[in-house]
Image (spheres, rainbow, N blue to C red):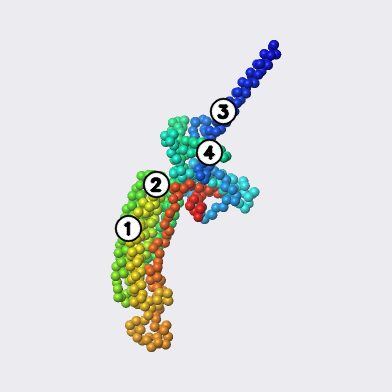
Amino acid sequence: MENYIEYILIGIFIVVATICLTVFLKKKTNQKQKVPTIVTDISTFRAPTNEEDGSHDLVIQMELLPTEYKIDESKLVEITNSKILARVNNLVPGIAQVGNTANNAVQAAQANSEVLYRAIIPAGAKLTKSTEIEKAFRGFYRDAENIKGHANFVSVEAQKGATVMANTAAAAMGVTSMVVGQYYMTQINTELGEISDGISKISDFQDNEYRSKVFSLITHVKKIADFQVEILDNIELRLSKIAQLDNLEEECTQLLAQANLTLVDYTKKKDIDFISYERELLEAQNWYLYQKSLLDIMQKIADLKYTLHLGSVSREQCLALLPTYRQQAVNTQTRLTKWHQDSTKRLNIEIEKTRRKRDGFDEVIHFIPGLINNELNFREIDKTTATTIHEQIYGERSSYKQEQSELYREDVQLISKNGKIYFLPETKAEE
């Protein structure tokens, strides 16, 4: 009897132990499932659980690029601004050091390949607002095969009660604005430098007041385009610079209208001899170059406004005035072209051969020799004159390709290489 009771007690003990073990394992499994992997269409993120403060903060994960992954070095834009680098390191701690350490460790084994690490910051537009939790964003998590569920990211309270940035979404968007803003503004500043160099080559002429206004305009625009973190980081400062750009755009349109009207005046000069035509041609060239430069400056002002709006305003809205003034330039160009065609035909100018038919007394004294050798009926014209005529007839309206990229709406790719951090614009990466 005693043995029978003993067997019953042992059986009960085994059943209880089994139940406890099952509950423990199930609880352990559930805890692991609460750590989701957040996925965007091209990048992977992890939302770990901090047991101490209960936070669920989004962590941007770095990935080691495969050795066969090729990057066009010319498309990498190094991030050198110390304030931006500090923010990047706060968002993705140790990204530069990780890339450098990995490179040193693997370099011997992969002598012919560089080790690259990539971190991708998702575009702000791709964070979907949560319908379940106020002031939250929604993502999804998955296992190796399927989407398993959704995760809501919210701001958390630190131990002292201070609000921590919501799952680094605000920090990520801030870094995105800085990186993309620096890229655009540096590019615009470089192009404005080229425009300024072109204006400097315009020969001196009577209207020095106009010349000084154009130089003042481009100087002020270039000063705004000179990248400063403070401009993008301070909403009041950004808005004041946008307002200043609106004023500069208005000034640019006035100067452009004056250039267009002056060029039209030249086209009204008919029945002039070659000497007069050549003189008017060279004066018109100054206004032609101003017109061309001002159209380019107007384009850069629009690009700057788009940049300072951080992509929240469409390029079309920022470019709203440009089509009108570009069309005025096209109409002016049509009249200028016809004036040159009529004048060169009347004055018997052959642009390609840089010569014109002799006229007046010069034609008379060469009449007899010209019957023997037709070449003697022509005289050479200055090569600069021929080039200028050709440029005003066939020249391009703008030297710079209109910027179409929407980098504020794209994921920001950061590449860590040899201890340095680079920005790889998605648009350029696909070209």
Disc 4/disc 1 C-alpha distance (Å): 54 Å
Query: Which residue position holds label 1?
Result: 253
Could you classify mark 1 by the number of other residues whose Cα lies within 10 Å: few (under 14), some (14-19), or many (20 or more)? some
Give the residue type at disc 4: Ile
| Residue 12 on image: x %, y % | 63, 18
3 or 4: tag closer to the N-terminus = 3
Q: Is residue 141 left or right of residue 227?
A: right
- Please tell me which residue lies in front, 273 or 411: 411
In the image, 240 versus 306, the foreground residue is 306
Q: Earlier in the sequence, mark 3 or mark 2?
A: 3
Q: Locate residue 261 relative to residue 96 in the image: left or right.
A: left
Q: Nearer the viewer, mark 1 or mark 2?
A: 2
Which residue is denoted by mark 4 in the rendering? 147
Identify the residue under disc 3. Answer: 27
Up the image or down, 332 lies above or below 171; here it is: below
Mark closest to the chain's N terminus, 4 or 2: 4
